[in-house]
Every structure is written in C-alpha cells, then in structure tokens.
Amino acid sequence: MSQRSVVWPRSVAWLLFGVLAVVVGVVSAFQVRGALEREREFRAAPACASVPVRASGCVWQQGFTVRTADLHRNERRESPEAELVPPSGEPWRVTFRDTEPVLSEMEPGEKVVGLVWHGEVVEVRDTEGRLQPTSSGPVGWPEDRLGGALSCVSFGLPALVGGAWALLARGRRRHAAAATVVRWHGVVLGITAILTLWAQSANDWPLWSIPAIWGPLALLGLASMTAFTLAALRGELTDDAPAVPQTPQPQAS
C-alpha cells in the first residue's frame, strides 16, 4: 500500500472530525447566553409561599425518601440516577451529571431534601448539608457550555484546516508536514481548554476565569503552531533530499 493511499483516508478523517467539532462548538457557544439567563433566573427565584400545585418559577424544598440509587459506573451511556419518594407516594426519577458528593453515599430509606424549580428537582441535599445539582439544575451549565465551545472549536478548526491542507498537498512533503503540525497543535489546544474547564470546576472559579486562563495559553499555542508551520514549510522538519541509490562496490580479489 502506497503512502498516498494511507494519507488520504487519514486526512479525510481529520477533516470530518474537524467539521463535526466546529459544529458542536458553535452550537455550545450559542447555548452559553441561554444558560446564563436560566442560572440568573434560578438564583433570583423567590421561595414558594406554599407547595406549588404546578410547575412554578419559585423554589420549594421538598422532603424525599430514597428508594433506589444507581451510579451506573460500568455503563457510560447511562446517567447516575436515583428514585426519590415524597410523602405523597409518587416516586420522582432524578438523574445527575456525576456521583459526588451526595449520590455516591445514598442508601435506600435515607432522607434527603430536594429543591424543586419549574416542576423539577434541581438540587439534592443530604442530612449532612451537602448539596449536589441534578441534571436539571441550571448552576454550572454556562461554564460547561463555554468550556465545550472553546475545546471543540480550538480542536476543530486546526483539524479542518490541517485535513484540507493535507488533501491539497498532493505529495508535497513540506506542506504535508505543515498540515500535520497544524492538526496536532489543535489537539493540544483542545486538551488545554478541557483542563481549564476542569480547573475552574474543581476550584469553583467564576465564568470569566475560563477565558482568562485559556486565552494566554491559546496564544502560546498559536505562536508555537505558527513557528513550527513556518519551519515545516522551510523544510526544517522534513528531509527533501532524494534517496541516493547505493551502488555495490567491487570487491578486491
């Protein structure tokens, strides 16, 4: 199999992954504003004067008894969940984004308090006072959407450009090397965005800390990408010298 027949499918794969990542990143970016507005609405919501009979914008603390708690640790496609039973007896199925700090220690029969907003349990508090947002909780979604947008776009654009560049290189080794540099720098930029989001979430930093941390790191990554791309185009990363055929030397008799 020739090198060209291997490079083309690989370049097409990079191109398709780049397009998909950019689309997901753009969608996530458009969701940031809505997530911010929803979080602000939740934080400004008043307490309900009485038990709401229908979905309401006020917040209500409802006592529940845990019926089941399933972490789904071996099932990646399943969200961690719990079945909570209020005094009325009709169970509520609540899903979570992760298992800590409350769900992992839930036991059947345990008492918890759920914060109900717009007809959904958005937070759960255990008897020790620890809080955990559910999948319906609005807190933290703006950071997740922004981090997702940065990671997908910062990976997707270089992958798209590098994949298309490699397809158009047509055997030019310097351009193929430059395309490779662009693609792998995009991978590093995407990972940097993910690590930035992780640091923000672990330390409970505000939303603006994500671009504040990732921005300078991204500039360094772009500077490195530019320098290595120019070096590849100058031939400093490839050996353009044609292979010299080795002629057998006559042996002395």
Image (cartoon, grey):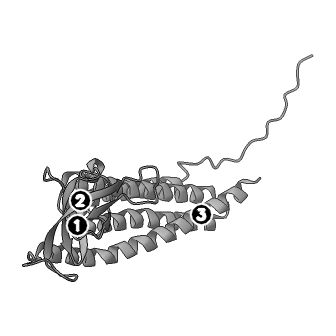
Distance from Cα at disc 1 to Cα at disc 3: 51 Å
Q: Camera-side residue: 15 or 177? A: 15
Would residue 230 be visible to someone looking at this image? no
**Label 1–label 2 contact, CB within 8 A:** yes
Label ID, residue 65: 2
Residue 194 spot, x, y in % from top left: 35, 56
User: Pointer 2: residues within 10 angstroms few (<14), some, or many (20+)?
Assistant: some
Residue 93 spot, x, y in % from top left: 33, 66
Please tell me which of labels 1 and 2 falls first in the chain. Answer: 2
In this view, the residue farthest toward the right is 253
Q: Name the amino acid type tagged 1.
A: Pro
Label ID, residue 37: none
Label ID, residue 13: 3
Residue at image point 23% right, 71% down: 88
Residue 159 spot, x, y in % from top left: 50, 63
As drawn, 176 above or below 61:
above
Provide the residue designation for mark 1. 86
Q: Name the quadrant containing residue 81.
A: bottom left
Callout 3 secondary element: helix
Callout 2 secondary element: strand
Would residue 8 be visible to someone looking at this image? yes
Please tell me which of labels 2 and 3 falls first in the chain. Answer: 3
Please tell me which of labels 1 and 3 falls first in the chain. Answer: 3
205 to the left or right of 196: left
Quadrant into which the C terminus falls: top right
Q: Name the amino acid type tagged 2.
A: Thr
Distance from Cα at disc 1 to Cα at disc 2: 6 Å
Q: Camera-side residue: 99 or 32? A: 99
- Closest to the camera, between mark 2 and mark 3, is 2
Residue 220 spot, x, y in % from top left: 32, 55
